[in-house]
């Protein structure tokens, strides 16, 4: 019991550094909530219950940058489902992993989990994941295969099994019973490639990208119709800067009238990733808002770097676009600038961020805590960042093998 109290006390101590708690009334409210949650720790708890408490403590802040994730915990009874999930615009679907039962196909609509309707699951996720409904669903879908999350949401049946009520592409419904299996640190190794294949199938021009230029966090190619630059993380280094310059040079050589920046599955990183784009875009972008601050100062002072692109810029975004990637999508779009294409980003355009990362001493649960308030960089703060040109990925798209991004790209320029 001393070990569990040490784990939970560590989480509370780090969460107390959250800048929201500089407000005395907020600090009192969090202290009261933490005391209430931790009363359960005065008696021995199963490890999944400890992980649930840590998730709830972090979710109290309603800050999408502050959360705990038992999915990457490393303790003896860590268990998970043999199937991944993805929340689309109109529902939750399954994504196959190597050990997923053959009765489950990628794209099966999840109607209920252990008799709990999916809409109710979405509401319950808010107790474990901060941010608005869109963000809670996005992060929660990744966490739904973790046993602590399933238990916390009341989705584990007597005997430790989980049932999925699924609707197939032909409208048939089936129920599949699943056993949770030992995670052994391997679930992310199975889940991540499965989701990468999913996104490659439904969100990317994968064939063209395979023939393009690749780096650790970016891939690009250019045609006479458009240039396409995919970023999976905001990393600001020499290789990335050189890649952006090479990309715009190829766009200029091909006389491409359109550039597409893909941030659909970009979880953020260094906000200075905006710099090379602002350097290669017309002065209108740099002068659009003097609050576009970078490490080099205000955006209008950034020196232009040839070639300068003056055509149409589109920024692809989704519920997986987060943090600095949201910042970049906002910075490059708006009246007279680029156009956001895709689905709504479930994150406010002003909020807490610049996180500190931790791992609990006993369960080794990953969690992060915001360190400062980040004001909006453009105009008035918004609760989320909607697409200006909707291009939503639906359950029907996945079930029928439709890639809306590829279909849209075919209409360019």
Image (cartoon, helix red, strand yellow):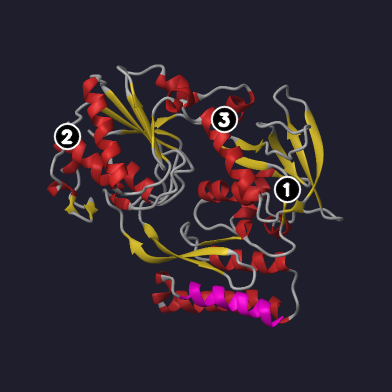
- Magenta span contains residue 4: yes
In the picture, residue 52 is in which quadrant? bottom right
Specify whether 167 is left or right of 261: right
| Residue 407 coordinates in the image, percent (x, y) | 46, 20
Q: Secondary structure at mark 2?
A: loop
- The residue where tag 3 is placed is 394
Q: Residues within 10 Å of mark 1 (few under 14, many from 20)?
A: many
Residue at image point 30% right, 54% down: 376
In the picture, residue 316 is in which quadrant? top left
Looking at the image, tell me whether mark 3 or mark 1 is earlier in sequence order: 1
Give the magenta range.
1-16
Looking at the image, tell me whether mark 2 or mark 1 is earlier in sequence order: 1
Foreground label between 2 and 3: 2
Q: Are marks 3 and 1 in contact (CB under 8 Å)?
A: no
| Residue 37 coordinates in the image, percent (x, y) | 64, 74
- The residue where tag 1 is placed is 81
- The residue where tag 2 is placed is 282
Distance Cα–Cα, label 3 vs label 1? 24 Å
Residue 388 visible to an observer of this rendering: no
Which quarter of the image is occupied by the C terminus? top left
Residue at image point 27% right, 42% down: 241
Q: Secondary structure at mark 3?
A: loop
Looking at the image, tell me whether mark 2 or mark 3 is earlier in sequence order: 2
């Amino acid at each position: 019991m001393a070990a569990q109290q040490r784990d939970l006390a560590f989480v509370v101590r780090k969460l107390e550094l959250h800048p929201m708690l500089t407000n005395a009334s907020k600090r009192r409210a969090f202290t009261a909530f933490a005391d209430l949650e931790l009363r359960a720790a005065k008696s021995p708890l199963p490890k999944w219950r400890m992980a649930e408490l840590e998730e709830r403590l972090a979710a109290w802040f309603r800050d999408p940058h502050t959360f705990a994730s038992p999915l990457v915990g490393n303790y003896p009874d860590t268990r998970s489902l043999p199937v991944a999930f993805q929340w689309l615009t109109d529902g939750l679907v399954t994504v196959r992993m190597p050990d997923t039962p053959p009765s489950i196909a990628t794209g099966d609509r999840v109607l209920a989990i252990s008799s709990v309707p999916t809409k109710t699951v979405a509401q319950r996720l808010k107790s474990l994941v901060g941010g608005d409904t869109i963000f809670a669903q996005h992060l929660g879908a990744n966490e739904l295969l973790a046993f602590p999350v399933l238990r916390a949401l009341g989705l584990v049946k007597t005997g430790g099994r989980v049932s999925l009520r699924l609707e197939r592409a032909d409208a048939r419904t089936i129920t599949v019973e699943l056993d949770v299996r030992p995670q052994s640190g391997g679930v992310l190794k199975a889940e991540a490639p499965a989701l990468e294949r999913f996104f490659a199938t439904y969100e990317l021009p994968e064939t063209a990208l395979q023939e393009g230029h690749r780096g650790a966090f970016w891939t690009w190619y250019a045609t006479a119709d458009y240039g396409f630059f995919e970023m999976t993380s905001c990393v600001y280094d020499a290789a990335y800067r050189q890649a952006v310059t090479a990309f715009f040079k190829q766009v200029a050589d091909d006389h491409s009238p359109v550039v597409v920046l893909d941030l659909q599955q970009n979880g953020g990183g260094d906000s200075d990733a905006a710099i090379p784009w602002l350097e290669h875009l017309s002065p209108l972008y740099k002068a659009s808002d003097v609050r576009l601050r970078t490490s080099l100062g205000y955006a209008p002072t950034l020196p232009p770097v040839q070639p300068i692109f003056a055509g149409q810029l589109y920024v692809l975004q989704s519920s997986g676009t987060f943090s600095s990637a949201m910042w970049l999508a906002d910075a490059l779009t708006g009246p007279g600038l680029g156009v956001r294409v895709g689905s709504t980003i479930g994150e406010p355009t002003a909020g807490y961020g610049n996180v500190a990362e931790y791992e609990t001493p006993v369960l080794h649960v990953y969690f992060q805590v915001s360190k400062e308030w980040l004001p909006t960089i453009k105009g008035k703060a918004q609760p989320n960042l909607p697409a200006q040109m909707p291009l939503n990925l639906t359950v029907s798209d996945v079930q029928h093998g439709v890639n809306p991004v590829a279909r849209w790209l075919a209409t360019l320029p």
